[in-house]
Image: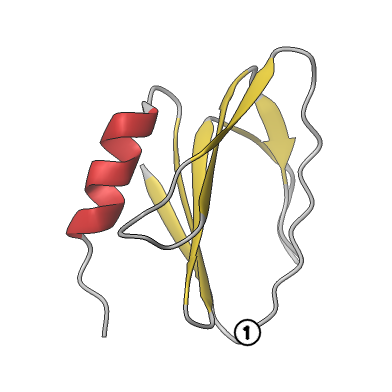
Amino acid sequence: VLLSEFPGGAVYLKKLASGGSQLSPAPVDGAPGLFVSGARHVTFFAGQSPRLAGNVLLWTVGEVTYRLEGPNLTQEDAIALAQSLRRG
């Protein structure tokens, strides 16, 4: 799995979902979250080359947005892993 952290308050993320993708609400310890699964998709970040990505859990805590990705990651496993992270 790959964990990314985006600090600094408002973060604008744009995700284009094809017909093979599913979007599900996925709160993490009460924080708002979204799980994107299904069809593989391309993701890119500023200054990096595009790459294929797997299933993704996105959630926010305070002013930090987290992104947890894994090709075979289930929603249940993603939430459990996210809840196990130590923040602070």
* Coordinates of residue 2 in the picture (x, y in percent): 41, 48
**What element does badge 1 sit on?**
loop
In the drawing, does residue 28 fall left or right of residue 11? left
Single out the residue that lies furthest toward the front.
30
Q: Quadrant of residue 21?
A: top right
Q: Is residue 15 above or below residue 31?
A: above
Q: Quadrant of residue 53?
A: top right
* Coordinates of residue 84 in the picture (x, y in percent): 18, 57
Picture residue at 43% right of the left edge, 63% below the top: 31
* Coordinates of residue 81 in the picture (x, y in percent): 24, 47
Single out the residue that lies furthest toward the top.
20
For the residue pair 44 and 65, the one nearer the viewer reads as 65
In the drawing, does residue 31 fall left or right of residue 12? left
Location of the N terminus by quadrant is top left
Picture residue at 65% right of the left edge, 17% below the top: 39
Query: What's the residue type where badge 1 is placed?
Result: Gly
In the drawing, does residue 56 fall left or right of residue 48? left
Location of the C terminus by quadrant is bottom left
Q: Is residue 63 above or below residue 70?
A: below
Picture residue at 74% right of the left edge, 59% below the top: 13
Q: Residues within 10 Å of mark 1 (few under 14, many from 20)?
A: few
| Residue labelled with disc 1 | 9
For the residue pair 65 and 5, the one nearer the viewer reads as 65
For the residue pair 19 and 47, the one nearer the viewer reads as 19
Q: Is residue 19 above or below residue 69?
A: above
In the drawing, does residue 21 fall left or right of residue 73? right
Q: Quadrant of residue 71?
A: top left
Picture residue at 20% right of the left edge, 71% below the top: 86
